[in-house]
Amino acid sequence: MTRTYTRFELAENQLTSAIGLFVTGRDRFSVITLAGAADVLLSRLVMNQGQENFTQRLGKQDAERNTPVALAAHGKAINDLLFINQLKHMDDGDDGFIELDPEECALRR
Amino acid sequence: MSRFHKGDIAKTQLQTAVFMFLEGRDRSSVITLAGAASGILDTMVRRSGQEAFLDYAPRVYRDLGGQMPKRSAYLHHINTRLGVIAHKHLWEEDSDTIELDLEQKAADVLPSQTTSRSTVKKNICEGIPELVLAQPGRSWHDGQVQNGA
């Protein structure tokens, strides 16, 4: 049945699942993917409220240290660090292998 | 630090999606996980010389009288139609709410990843209950796709 959902609900659903999977010791890759998707929605919602999200806060700290980094670069660095995109994309030139610590990435996510 | 192949990662996420679907758990998560697996499986299927869903479905659309949509346009269309994009992207101009049939989209997104006959997908689907694999495919081609959009 079609109904209206707030974007927050969609993020909340996924984040709740991610936490549920994590605390029950299930698949860490799914924890990372779900938390990553929720993060994208929540970050935008925070910005829409006129508040500062995590990425913006990092950018501000860099600017205060006179080492400004573009926000997009910050976002990409976080995604790369936690392998967010690697868990949902495979490019044509990709050999398909990645090295990561799923437990650590899931916990940090 | 461990080394993983993305095929195994896709399989794991897809199995989690199927598990959550069959257990009646959150449909948003089913959609996101199946969508993530799709982003990996699509490339693996094509590399194996098989026809991926994203090549098959546009061909059906064309054969039914439509134009052959570009692959990227069809990918966007399918991900929008299945609710994948709504669960992982949000732009400034988007509204705060969205109308979705989460149950239907979750039911649709799984067969799109599990019903291919390709060898790669067969291997990936090992361990996924036959109940899910047996679900009939849906009419993916009945929406409007802008050629070259």
Image (cartoon, grey):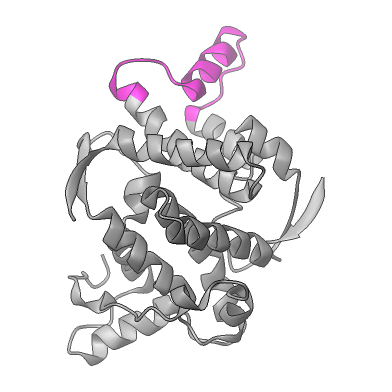
Residue at screen point 60% across, 11% down: A66
- Segment colored magenta: A46-71
Tell me the quarter of the image containing the C terminus of chain B. bottom left
Q: Residue A90: give x, y in percent of width and height.
A: 58, 62
Classify residue B147 as left or right of residue A74. Answer: left
Give the quarter of the figure containing the N terminus of chain B.
Answer: top right
Name the one closer to the observer, A23 or A77: A23
Task: Answer whether residue B49 is visible to the viewer in this image.
Answer: yes
Q: Quadrant of residue A40?
A: top left
Tell me which residue sits at (50%, 16%) in the image: A57
Left/right of residue A42 with respect to residue A71 in the rendered view: left
Could you tell me residue B148's position as x and y percent?
27, 70
Question: In front: A45, or B110?
Answer: B110
- Would you say A40 lies left or right of A5 here? right
Task: Indicate whether residue B141 is drawn in magenta.
Answer: no
Residue at the image position 28 percent from the left and 75 percent from the top: B140
Give coordinates of residue A106: x percent, y percent.
Answer: 64, 38
Q: Residue at x 40, y 48 (%)?
A: B26
Q: Using the rendered image of the protein, determine whether residue A94 is visible from the camera's viewpoint.
A: no
Q: Determine whether B117 is above or below A92 in the image.
A: below
Query: In the image, is residue A40 above or below residue B128?
Result: above
